[in-house]
Amino acid sequence: MKKQNSLKIWVLVGILTAINWQAQAQKREIGFSLGAMYYTGDLARKWVIPNTGIAGMVMLRTNMNNHLSLRVAYSGGNLKGSDAKPIDAFATARASSFNIFVSEFSGSFEYYFIDYKSKRAVLNWSPYFHGGVAIFGMLGHKDKTATYSTVQLALPLGFGIKYQPVKQWTVGFEYSVRILFFDYLDNISEGDVFNKNYQYGNKYDNDNYHYLGITVSRVLYKVVCPTLPLKQGYRRQ
């Protein structure tokens, strides 16, 4: 009888452990995104298609509940801009351009307006908002026009929509802007206005960069098979 009770206890412990582990695993997702980056600043006041670069992102997400998630991610992409289509006579004389690679590590939260994940959900999609903080580095400016660090702080803000075709997979579309406290993304900012080389811009208007992409993520499931401490030669009574 004691052996039977011990066996039942171990079975119960094993099942509860497996359920708890699986519940925790379902809170986590791994995913990626492919899309484009573009810049706005002294050389381009709005999105200009020729200035669009290829970009991508990998991410790990923890779902706190059905409305709120935390995300850590690495993003990388090409940023470029030029005065090829000048916005004024000053830009025509300046004739500047840049082409750099940006690497970014970010942490952000995502808030879903609709509960699309639960079993009782009526819809399997939801719009969402996300915001957080990021650190990015730039590679590609050969001749700096001033002394500045190539590693800077950014605030990612954006929105998107997610669709869950099956329980384990989610696809979506996302747009976000990186708000910067920095004006040398394009290597152009303040300068001597009396110097007629025109290699300067508006120092009171910081640069920004933007991301557009399609996202795909997968819930991390793991099935745990509980092991029982059965002794060799044990026979059921």
Image (cartoon, grey):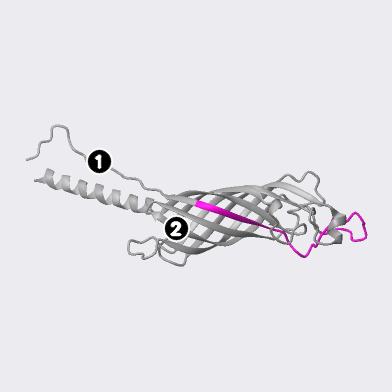
Q: Residue furthest bottom?
A: 113
The residue positioned 33% from the left and 50% from the top of the image is: 22
- Range drawn in magenta: 190-215
Count of numbered marks: 2
Q: Nearer the viewer, residue 90 or 77?
A: 90
**Disc 2 marks which amino acid?**
Tyr
Q: CA distance from mark 1 to mark 2?
A: 37 Å
Whether residue 43 is in magenta: the answer is no
What residue does disc 1 label? 227
Other-residue count near label 2 (Cα within 10 Å), few / some / many at <14 / 14–19 / ≥20 = some
Other-residue count near label 1 (Cα within 10 Å), few / some / many at <14 / 14–19 / ≥20 = few
First in residue order: circle 1 vs circle 2: 2
The correct choice, above or below, for 56 with respect to 133 in the image is above
Of badges 1 and 2, the one in the foreground is 2
Q: Nearer the viewer, residue 10 or 34?
A: 34
67 left or right, relative to 37 = left
Q: Secondary structure at mark 2?
A: strand
**Disc 1 marks which amino acid?**
Thr
The correct choice, above or below, for 138 with respect to 63 in the image is above
Q: Position of residue 39 (x, y in %)?
A: 69, 56
Residue 163 is labelled as 2
Location of residue 200 by image quarter: bottom right
Q: Position of residue 160 (x, y in %)?
A: 53, 61
41 left or right, relative to 105 = right
Whether residue 196 is in magenta: the answer is yes
Location of residue 90 by image quarter: bottom right
Q: Position of residue 25 (x, y in %)?
A: 38, 50
Quadrant holding the C terminus:
top left
Q: Nearer the viewer, residue 229 or 32?
A: 32
Magenta segment main secondary structure: loop
Q: Residue furthest top?
A: 233
Q: Position of residue 115 (x, y in %)?
A: 40, 65
